[in-house]
Each structure stands twice: as C-alpha cells, then as structure tokens.
Amino acid sequence: MSEAVPGIKSAFDKEDEGDVVVTDQRSPRPKDAATLILVRRDAATPRVLLGKRSGGHTFMPDKYVFPGGRVDPHDARAPTLTPLSEPVATKLAIGTRRAPHAFALTAIRETFEETGLIVGRPGTHTGKPPQGWHRYYGEGVMPCLESFEFIGRAITPPYRPKRFDARFFMADAEDALIDERPPVDGAELSDLQWVTLADALDLDLPSVTRFMLGEIGERIAKQQATKGPPFLRWTRNGHTTDRL
C-alpha cells in the first residue's frame, strides 16, 4: 500500500530498526495525537517542514518528523475563526468520540510550541484562553481550520513503549501561517528545516513519515485527493492499511 514512495516496502517501522521495543509488558493503549504537515510552494519545488526529535526520547529518538503531539482535552475548547470543512470533519469523526476539530487544534498548538510558527489569522479572543493556549492567543491571533486537509491516520504498533493514534493534516504554509517568520528550534524539535520531498527521503525518517510524504506527493501532483485518507493500524492479521 506504500507504492507512492519509491524504495519503501512498509508504512510501519520494523521491530529491529533501532527504536525501543517492548516485549515483557502489556502494550499501552494508543493516545490521540495530531500532526501538521506544512507545505511551502514559493519555490520551483514544494517543500515541507521537518525537525529532529531529541535522542533522549523513547518514542522515535533522533528521527525527523513533522510537528505534532498528543491531544489535550482543553484543545477542543479553543475558539476558532473558521471551522473544518464538512468532508474533513466527517472523516475525522470515524472511530472516535472526540470532537473532530480537537485534532486540528492540537496540530496548531503543537506546531506553535515546537517551532514558534503561528497557524491562524489576526483576531481577538475576549474570554479566558483554555489551558495551554494563553501564549498562542497572546499573539493576537485566532485558529483557522478551513484550509486543513486530512491526509492520513496511523496507530503506533503494539510493541512500542509509547503508542499514538495520530491524525495527519496538510496545509499550504502561505495560506495557513500568519507571517513568514522562520521556525525556531526548541526542546522537542531541532534542526528545523524546509526540505523538498526528495531531500526529505534522505533524512532519518520513521516509515510512517515516509509513507505520508508519498501521500503529499500524490496530492501535490494531482492538485486534489483522489483516494480517501489511509488508515494504518495493527490487527490480528498484522499491519493493515485501509482507506477512510
């Protein structure tokens, strides 16, 4: 199912690829998470934003990833200027009781915390911001969700010490970001850089990230989605990829 990216045979990391593997305890329950893939089209070849995770992490240490993280219950209460499109919200609602917009808001908050980049538009929130959102709203901005594309969902295999049920979003940087400030390295991500899809494949990436790069490449080439978002997960029959 990963034919979109040449040279990759599986969308899942193997147990012997250097990451931490758990074999002597019960597999943890996946936690909801969200990731934002920002695409810049201001050059001849589109570029995406990637950063390197700390080597001290037990989950994907030293790997290059897109900004993102765990969904916080307060994220769903963050006010927005525009909602998700109906098709995106409908796809996100499959298999979860969580409000669809919570995932997109998590992606915005995590991108801001990990890179300093602001996804949104100028706006004023008059009430008390939800927990974890004070600094974001203090920038005089409001989240906008209407341009977000839902491009995939992936659940970490059960042999990992930390597991996430991650939703991957894509947005055009020129439209989504409030300005052209450069990304700033932080505690979570370092060596933040805008790279072409081809150059990204030369970085040390998790297999699921490589797979999503293939999805991005197809969408950029065809200007629209021709297939539903892939859903990568583990079943009794092993790794499975379906389309939502």
Image (cartoon, rainbow, N blue to C red):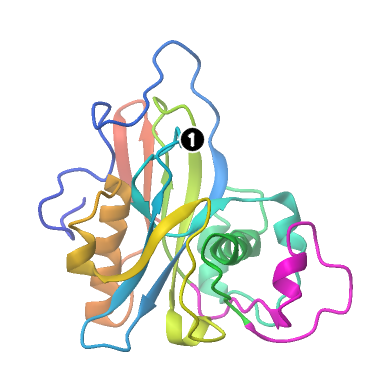
Secondary structure character of the magenta stretch overall? loop
> Label 1 crowding class (10 Å Cα cut-off): few <14, some 14-19, many 20+?
some
Q: Residue at x 57, y 76 (%)?
A: 119
Q: Which residue is drawn at 51% across and 51% down?
A: 188
Please check the rendered image and state whether residue 176 is part of the magenta-colored stretch, yes or no.
Answer: no
In the image, taking residue 151 as reference, residue 95 lies left or right, namely: right
In the image, taking residue 51 as reference, residue 136 lies left or right, namely: right
Q: In the figure, 202 relative to 88: above or below?
A: above
Quadrant, the C terminus: bottom left
Q: Residue at x 30, y 35 (%)?
A: 239
Residue 237 vs residue 78, the one in the foreground: 78
Q: Mark 1 points at which residue?
A: 163
The kind of residue tagged 1 is: Arg
Q: In the figure, 150 relative to 167: above or below?
A: below
Q: Position of residue 105 (x, y in %)?
A: 63, 65
The answer to whether residue 76 of the structure is visible from this angle is yes
In the image, taking residue 181 as reference, residue 239 lies left or right, namely: left
Magenta-colored span: 121-148
Q: In the figure, 196 relative to 147: above or below?
A: above
- Say which quarter of the image contains residue 17: top left
- Say which quarter of the image contains residue 171: bottom left
Please check the rendered image and state whether residue 135 is part of the magenta-colored stretch, yes or no.
Answer: yes
In the image, taking residue 197 as reference, residue 30 lies left or right, namely: right
- Say which quarter of the image contains residue 195: bottom left
Q: Where is residue 48 in the image (x, y as percent from the top left)?
A: 34, 71
Q: Where is residue 236 in the image (x, y as percent from the top left)?
A: 36, 25
Element at label 1 = loop
